[in-house]
Image (spheres, rainbow, N blue to C red):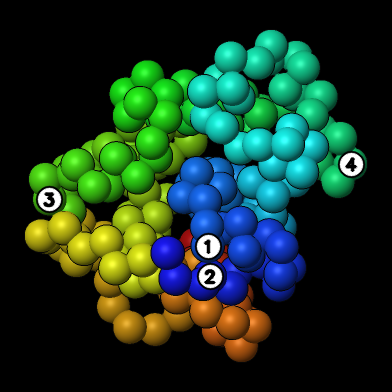
């Protein structure tokens, strides 16, 4: 996997670059939380658990896992609900993909199929799934036929989402873009 630079934390970015499950969890946690902090979630869990094994996470007692996820600094500002989503994702990765998260995309038959697979995960609506598929395409070279159509505008060049973050400067450009979109929506609304 190429070297990712999303969090501004060298150890967390290294894990994102080496562990596809950490990357998927970061995307799952990127909701009502600063992007770079969300993508540190896998690193926090790996540090506390000593692993980031989907099967072991899926098997953990939900209350015990919630405690691990909630320990300061928590994996999210809503660690309880997010710990349940993380365990749900771990369960699907374990049961449907044999614990190998990369099968989610390596076995996808098209961009549309990949989008559908990602949307089947807890907490992944259409937009979040499109952003993750775009991230896979732009940063990891995972480009099944039709991925551009499946992700819409997220396939375009620019600074629209985490898929376009490669350094501190691009992170700020994505943040600026999101603020402009929110302001435009508020003005229109």
Q: Which residue is mark 4?
A: 72
Residue at position x 27%, y 61% from top? 142
Q: Earlier in the sequence, mark 1 or mark 4?
A: 1
Percent from the top left, x then y, of residue 74?
81, 41
Residue on which the image places disc 2? 4
Instruction: Identify the element where label 2 is drawn.
Output: loop
Labels 2 and 1 touching (C-beta < 8 A): yes
Distance CA(mark 1)–CA(mark 3): 24 Å
Do the numbered discs 3 and 2 sit on residues whose CB atoms are within 8 Å?
no
Say few, some or many: other residues with alpha carbon within 10 Å of mark 2 (under 14 / 14 to 19 / 20 or more).
Answer: many
Q: Earlier in the sequence, mark 3 or mark 2?
A: 2
Q: Earlier in the sequence, mark 1 or mark 3?
A: 1
Instruction: Quadrant for residue 39, please give it.
Output: bottom right
Q: Residues within 10 Å of mark 4 (few under 14, many from 20)?
A: few
In primary-sequence order, the first of circles 4 and 2 is: 2
Note whether 101 is above or below 32 in the view shown: above
Calculate the distance from the C-alpha at mark 4 to the C-alpha at mark 3. Answer: 40 Å
Cα distance between the residues tagged 3 and 2: 24 Å
The residue under label 1 is 17
> Residue placed at 56% from the left, 48% from the top?
22
Task: Tell me, yes or no, whether the two marked residues, 4 and 3, touch with CB atoms within 8 Å.
Answer: no
Judging by the rendered image, the residue that carries numbered circle 3 is: 110
Residue 60 appearing in the image: yes
Label 1 packing within 10 angstroms: few (<14), some (14-19), many (20+): some
Image quadrant containing the N terminus: bottom left
Residue at 62% in and 64% down? 14
Compared with residue 144, is residue 51 higher up or lower down, i.e. above or below?
above
Q: Nearer the viewer, mark 3 or mark 2?
A: 2
């Amino acid at each position: 996997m190429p070297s990712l630079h999303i969090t501004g934390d060298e150890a967390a970015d290294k894990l994102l670059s080496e562990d596809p499950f950490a990357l998927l969890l970061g995307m799952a946690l990127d909701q009502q939380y600063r992007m770079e902090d969300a993508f540190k979630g896998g690193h926090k869990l790996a540090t506390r658990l000593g692993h980031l094994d989907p099967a072991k996470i899926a098997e953990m007692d939900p209350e015990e896992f919630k405690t691990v996820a909630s320990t300061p600094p928590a994996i999210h500002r809503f660690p309880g609900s997010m710990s349940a989503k993380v365990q749900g994702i771990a369960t699907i990765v374990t049961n449907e993909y044999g614990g190998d998260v990369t099968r989610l995309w390596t076995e996808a038959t098209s961009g549309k199929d990949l989008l559908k697979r990602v949307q089947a995960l807890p907490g992944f609506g259409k937009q979040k799934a499109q952003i993750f598929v775009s991230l896979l395409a732009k940063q990891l070279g995972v480009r099944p036929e039709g991925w551009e159509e499946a992700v819409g505008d997220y396939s375009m060049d620019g600074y629209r989402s985490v898929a376009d973050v490669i350094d501190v400067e691009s992170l700020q450009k994505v943040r600026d873009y999101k603020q402009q979109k929110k302001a435009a929506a508020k003005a229109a609304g």
